[in-house]
Image (cartoon, helix red, strand yellow):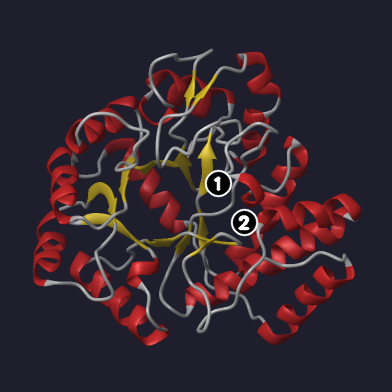
Amino acid sequence: MQPRAFITGVSGTELNAEERAFIRSELPWGFILFKRNIENPKQVMLLVEELKQLAGRSEVPILIDQEGGRVQRLGPPHWPVYPPGALFGALYDSDPARGLKAAHLSARLIAADLFELGITVDCLPLADLPVADADAVIGDRAYGAEPEKVARIARSVVEGLGQGGILPVLKHIPGHGRATADSHLRLPNVKTSESELKRTDFAAFQPLADLPMAMTAHVVFSAIDPVHPATTSATIIHQVIRGVIGFQGLLMSDDVSMNALSGSISERTRAILAAGCDMVLHCNGKLAEMREVAVETPELSGKALQRARQAMASRRGPQPLDRGAARAELEVMIKQAGITSA
């Protein structure tokens, strides 16, 4: 029996009996952790191990959003604070090699933190290009506003994660940087022309099209599909994400429970899959919603199954790392640039 085509969160630091029964019966492909699931390293390791055992497979993706800056699920006192993406962009502007090295070191250190907990996937890097009047939801999470620069920094992040045994998830494809609303709260509508989007936003993702996984943007691009956000738009997924950008890896939705999407959780799940996403992501740990997603989600099969297998097969074991030396080098680079880490 194949797992179902969804990734789920759980409610707390330990599983309850209902969650255990749900995981055994519905077999989600993977799991995603949030701050509500994290107390200390030993607790996280036990939770991760139980999730893997309940899923009943040797390779179970355990995801987390560990970017640095504002989006960091693991933090003090047990884990370090990491800089936001914009810091690497600022370093890059003064010295491209230094910016790329800093991005790589930060990602490699994050990977070391994740690997020892049993977490296998980081929802990173971002290739979003923020503009001046955009909502701050992306803001300093982004590496910059020029496609080539952003793609180069993102590639360094990917390499750092990979050397630490962690798979990346590229987000938020085909671009969240122009959104004038936070898609957690309401649906953004980007009215930029298709030609301009191809020159800027989409161009940042194209050099990263070979990555194993990507996450969609809950954003309407009205010049291409005036009705549906990218997550539920067959036009955007097939013509832009798979076509213009050329991404052929596993495509997961952003969180199905976010307010940018309309309809019930069941309706949203059906729309996500019908549009061409391979995987539905559900994050809030509410069991009633998790059950709605599971009812509407089929077992992985066909291209979605193939992409899922290829993604997991691309993961490699970690290379040796002197964490103390790497952390010291990163801090020196930041201080020499005169930039204060977040």
Q: Amino acid at mark 2?
A: Val
Asked if the residue under mark 2 is in contact with the one under mark 1, i.e. CB atoms within 8 Å, the reply is yes
Bin the neighbour count of mark 1 within 10 Å (Cα to Cα): few under 14, some 14-19, many 20 and up: many
Determine the secondary structure under disc 2.
Answer: helix
Of residues 283 and 296, the one drawn nearer to the viewer in this rendering: 283
Quarter of the image with the C terminus is bottom right
Horizontal side of 143 relative to 294 (left or right) equals right
Residue 241 % position (x, y)? 51, 29
According to the picture, the residue beneath numbered tag 2 turns out to be 158
**Residue at (31% x, 41% y) in the render:** 256
Horizontal side of 160 relative to 217 (left or right) equals right
Horizontal side of 230 relative to 163 (left or right) equals left
Q: CA distance from mark 1 to mark 2?
A: 9 Å
Residue 287 % position (x, y)? 16, 56
**Residue at (64% x, 80% y) in the render:** 320
Determine the secondary structure under disc 1.
Answer: loop
According to the picture, the residue beneath numbered tag 1 turns out to be 211
Please tell me the numbered disc located at residue 229. none
